[in-house]
């Protein structure tokens, strides 16, 4: 009995890799014709997803979300501010999305990634328009003091579907958020009381407290998203960076926890989003939202 020719197997693998590099679209279309992707996923299946809470000890709320290799770290810092005259009973949320050079070879040191401000704006619009957070719940004293929440999301590995992973990390971080204790100081201003100072300021907290203990936000209409690629007659859910670079018609559907559509994005590409394609993407987004609800099962989803 002859032994397997390992050199022949290696040559075959090199030929496949070379074909993938030289003719990437043809390589992918060969797989698509069999309703399978190069990573062995069916066309409608998202990658494995992991969420971990409370990884940043210096933040008031934090979470790490990983979809396949795409990894996001979200951290929330709360500060007391003076509310605007237009909304004296509401706080504010500021969202910033960061893409450091470590996340991708295409991000160069000293040059901000072009996608970062676009994703920041989309995240901010989605979080606020979904109604997930009642900004009135961030009010401390009407017209005088309210919470300003700074949400920073860092992309640690950019391997496709960045918005989906960033939104998931943001939702998870808000579920982990603990609103700090605040009290009136000697000047009559509301200030946050750190954990280290709570014991030293016990008398102040007892007599002048605005809130005597940390509390969580009530989250409603939680948004979940799914990005799909439209290519010819195919729809690919949760694309990788390689898939996005080859087939550039992207559609992102955002649904809330009640299955109501929050937003629909179509960015670039030559493929037209026909009504049948949109319906298919929405159905895939509903299926994905159920999966994400299970992953975030400990959250209080209304």
Image (cartoon, rainbow, N blue to C red):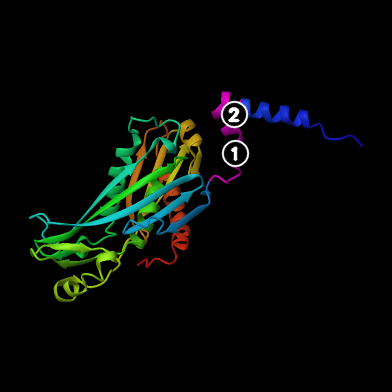
Q: CA distance from mark 1 to mark 2?
A: 10 Å
Instruction: Name the quadrant of the N terminus.
Output: top right
Residue placed at 50% from the left, 34% from the top? 242
Residue 274 seen in the current view: no
Residue 151 visible, this angle = yes
Nearer to us in this view, 170 or 254 = 170
Marks 2 and 1: in contact by CB < 8 Å?
yes
| Mark 1 lies on residue | 38
Examine the image and state in which quarter residue 289 appears: bottom left
Q: Is residue 204 above or below residue 263?
A: below
Q: Residues within 10 Å of mark 2 (few under 14, many from 20)?
A: some
Any mark on residue 86, and which?
none
Magenta highlight on residue 31 = yes
- Counting the numbered discs, the total is 2
Report the span colored magenta: 19-43
Q: Which residue is most to the front?
A: 200
Q: Position of residue 231 (x, y in %)?
A: 48, 35
Is 28 colored magenta in this rendering? yes
Q: Residues within 10 Å of mark 1 (few under 14, many from 20)?
A: few
What is the secondary structure assignment of the residue under circle 1?
Answer: loop
Which of pointers 1 and 2 lies earlier in the amino acid sequence? Answer: 2
Q: Is residue 296 left or right of residue 40?
A: left
Work out whether residue 217 or residue 12 is closer to the camera in this orientation and state it: 217
Label 2's element? helix
The disc placed on residue 20 is 2
* Place of residue 95 in the rendered image (x, y in percent of width and height, measured from the top left): 28, 48
Dividing the image into 4 quarters, which one contains the C terminus? bottom left
The residue that appears at 36% across and 62% down in the rendered structure is 176
């Amino acid at each position: 009995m002859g032994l397997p020719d390992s050199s022949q197997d290696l040559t075959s693998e090199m030929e496949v890799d070379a074909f993938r590099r030289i003719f990437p679209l043809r390589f992918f279309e060969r797989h698509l014709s069999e309703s399978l992707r190069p990573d062995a996923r069916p066309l409608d299946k998202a990658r494995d997803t992991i969420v971990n809470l409370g990884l940043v000890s210096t933040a008031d709320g934090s979470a790490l979300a990983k979809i396949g290799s795409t990894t996001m770290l979200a951290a929330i810092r709360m500060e007391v501010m003076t509310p605007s005259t237009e909304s004296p009973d509401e706080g504010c949320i500021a969202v910033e999305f960061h893409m450091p050079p470590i996340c991708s070879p295409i991000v160069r040191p000293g040059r901000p990634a072009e996608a970062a401000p676009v994703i920041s704006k989309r995240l901010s619009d989605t979080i606020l328009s979904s109604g997930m957070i009642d900004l009135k719940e961030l009010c401390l004293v009407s017209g005088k003091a309210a919470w300003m929440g700074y949400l920073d999301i860092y992309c640690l590995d950019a391997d496709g579907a960045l918005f989906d992973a960033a939104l998931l990390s943001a939702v998870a971080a808000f579920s982990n958020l603990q609103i700090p204790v605040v009290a009136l100081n000697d000047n009559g201003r509301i200030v946050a009381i750190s954990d280290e100072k709570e014991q030293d300021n016990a008398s102040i907290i007892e007599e002048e407290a605005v809130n005597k203990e940390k509390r969580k936000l009530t989250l409603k209409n939680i948004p979940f998203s799914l990005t799909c690629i439209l290519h010819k007659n195919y729809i690919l859910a949760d694309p990788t960076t390689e898939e996005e670079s080859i087939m550039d018609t992207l559609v992102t559907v955002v649904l809330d926890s009640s299955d109501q559509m929050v937003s629909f994005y179509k960015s670039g590409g030559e493929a037209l989003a026909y009504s049948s394609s949109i319906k298919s993407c929405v159905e895939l987004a509903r299926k994905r939202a159920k999966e994400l609800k299970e992953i975030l099962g400990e959250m209080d989803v209304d």
